[in-house]
Image (cartoon, rainbow, N blue to C red):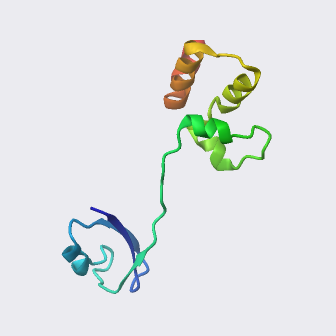
Amino acid sequence: MPIYEYECLGCRGQFQILVMNGNEENSVRCPHCNGSNLKRLISRVVYHVSEQARLEDFDPNAPKSDSFYRDTRNIGLTAKKRARQMGVELGSDFENKLERLRTDPGSVIKDSE
């Protein structure tokens, strides 16, 4: 059951739709203008990279884009990379705090006050 992305050539609106079977694709209409002159778009692909692989590929000295700093998975990546390079095990307390920082940064700040 793929989710297809379309652009309406009438109103230039873009939308996504879940197609349950091939016959449904012929009856897709634009939700903005109800037009049927549609072009299917090539959607972005998302894939999962394990933290282990991210850590191996991570270069702490490389320039970072704004999206790097907005991605909470990157919190603590530099510390983990440096610790691994030095052969230091940061322990479960570090991992637990890191997970809390990634999921709910405000809770860690409240605990330190």
Q: How far across and down, in percent of the image, does residue 78 sit?
A: 70, 31
Q: Is residue 43 above or below residue 37?
A: above
What residue do we see at 56% from left, 20% from top? 95
Question: Which quadrant, please, contains the N terminus?
Answer: bottom left
Question: Which quadrant, please, contains the C terminus?
Answer: top right
Foreground residue, 38 or 46? 46
| Quarter where residue 35 is shown | bottom left
What residue do we see at 34% from left, 87% from top? 37
What residue do we see at 53% from left, 39% from top? 50
What residue do we see at 65% from left, 16% from top? 89
Q: Is residue 40 above or below residue 113?
A: below
Q: How far across and down, in percent of the image, does residue 33 sit?
A: 31, 80
Please indicate, yes or no, whether residue 113 appears anywhere in the rendered image.
no
Q: How many marks?
A: 0
Q: Is residue 29 above or below residue 4?
A: below
- Is 9 placed left or right of 60 in the picture? left
| Quarter where residue 9 is shown | bottom left
- Is 83 placed left or right of 41 in the picture? right
Q: How far across and down, in percent of the image, does residue 84 sit?
A: 70, 25
Q: How far across and down, in percent of the image, does residue 77 sit?
A: 65, 32
| Quarter where residue 2 is shown | bottom left
Which residue is situated farthest in the right direction here?
Answer: 61
Foreground residue, 19 or 102? 19
- Is 51 placed left or right of 31 in the picture? right
Please indicate, yes or no, whether residue 10 appears anywhere in the rendered image.
yes
Foreground residue, 58 or 40? 58
